[in-house]
């Protein structure tokens, strides 16, 4: 049996292994969290999407805020991929309640906690599940130029060895790959669609549809939409809006650390022109929803 010395910092947990009853490996920290699940809090905020739009960068920023106690992992994926594990498992991923309430730190010391699972916004069951368990939660949506997001998403899947088609072939075949998958998921809550999650290059960029689904369940005042281009261009301003939305104290300077960025060849001009036309109606709907033009065209 191996042991860890870093059990109190969930962002840097050293995976110390202990042989489980079934021969699998698990962390001592995870075992401790499971045993204390009843004494742990549920999240105050969720970054619900979108993938390849800066969710990891924003979560890193929030995790470094003095009033934020991060979850055991950034992407818990409870409301989409791990819902069958139950609420106690989910609760085990968050800090002990006394830490968040600030019982030992004095008045005004309350912290908040949250996680970032960028599939929540697209998953057909996740918003309803979130509403049932966390009716007052704050939801943060990151949107990025859908053309750049799709291309980044494609290269992410390619680097991971999960995509063998060219980008043009992948977007051509997306309707075929996703055909009936959402309907199967709606019909069977236990059905998990790999294609819907990994090959939805264009579908994920139809932001207005997904935000409308959130607004149908939550008060729009519980939903903050952040443009990722603005987050990277003017981090102090964008991050200031996020911490104000969460009711956190302002910070003097935002030291942004770009996460999960990659390099790849530029998209062809013909493909870009095609996607400009494809996303134009979706972008216009988003601009109307937000009351401002993000000028992605």
Image (cartoon, rainbow, N blue to C red):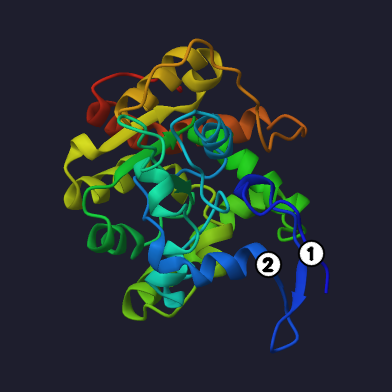
Q: Name the residue under label 2.
A: 28
* Residue at (21% x, 54% y) in the render: 135
Measured along the vertical axis of the image, is residue 173 above or below residue 183? above
What percent of the width, then of the height, locates residue 231?
Answer: 50, 21
Seen in the image, is 289 located left or right of residue 69?
left
Nearest the eye: 82 or 250: 250
What percent of the width, then of the height, locates residue 217?
Answer: 19, 53
Nearest the eye: 85 or 203: 85
> In the current view of this chain or complex, which residue is farthest to the bottom?
22
Can residue 158 be seen at all in this image of the molecule?
Answer: yes
Measured along the vertical axis of the image, is residue 68 above or below residue 238? below
* Residue at (27% x, 62% y) in the render: 133
Nearest the eye: 172 or 156: 156
SS at badge 2: helix
Labelled pair 2, 1 in contact (Cβ < 8 Å): yes
What percent of the width, then of the height, locates residue 50?
Answer: 47, 43
Nearest the eye: 120 or 285: 120
Seen in the image, is 44 located left or right of residue 16?
left
Measured along the vertical axis of the image, is residue 40 above or below residue 38? above
> In the current view of this chain or complex, which residue is farthest to the right?
2
Q: Residues within 10 Å of mark 1 (few under 14, many from 20)?
A: some
Q: Mark 1 points at which residue?
A: 3
Spatial separation of the CA atoms under disc 2 and disc 1: 7 Å
Q: How crowded is mark 2: few (under 14 residues within 10 Å), some or many (20 or more)?
A: many
Can residue 295 be seen at all in this image of the molecule?
Answer: no
The quadrant of the rendering that contains the N terminus is bottom right
């Amino acid at each position: 049996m191996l042991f860890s010395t870093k059990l109190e910092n969930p962002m840097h947990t050293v995976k110390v292994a202990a042989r489980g009853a079934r021969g699998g490996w698990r962390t001592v920290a995870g075992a401790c969290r499971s045993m204390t699940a009843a004494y742990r809090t549920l999240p105050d905020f969720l970054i619900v999407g979108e993938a390849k739009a800066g969710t990891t960068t924003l979560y890193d920023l929030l995790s470094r805020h003095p009033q934020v106690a991060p979850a055991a992992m950034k992407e818990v994926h409870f409301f989409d991929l791990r819902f069958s594990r139950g609420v106690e498992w989910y609760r085990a991923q968050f800090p002990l309640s006394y830490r968040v309430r600030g019982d030992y730190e004095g008045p005004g010391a309350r912290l908040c906690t949250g996680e970032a699972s960028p599939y929540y916004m697209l998953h057909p069951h996740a918003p309803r599940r979130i509403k049932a368990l966390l009716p007052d939660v704050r939801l943060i949506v990151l949107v990025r130029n859908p053309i750049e997001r799709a291309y980044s998403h494609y290269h992410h899947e390619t680097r991971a060895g999960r995509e063998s088609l060219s980008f043009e072939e992948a977007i051509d075949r997306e309707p075929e790959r996703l055909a009936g998958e959402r309907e199967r998921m709606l019909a069977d809550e236990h059905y998990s669609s790999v294609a819907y999650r990994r090959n939805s290059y264009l579908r994920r960029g139809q932001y207005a549809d997904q935000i409308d689904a959130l607004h149908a369940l939550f008060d729009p005042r519980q939903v903050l939409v952040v443009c990722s281009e603005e987050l990277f261009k003017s981090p102090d301003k964008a991050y200031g809006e996020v911490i104000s939305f969460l009711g956190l104290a302002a910070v003097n300077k935002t030291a942004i650390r770009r996460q999960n960025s990659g390099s790849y060849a530029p998209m062809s001009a013909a493909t870009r022109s095609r996607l400009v036309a494809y996303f134009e109606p979706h972008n216009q709907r988003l601009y109307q929803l937000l009351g401002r033009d993000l000028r992605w065209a």
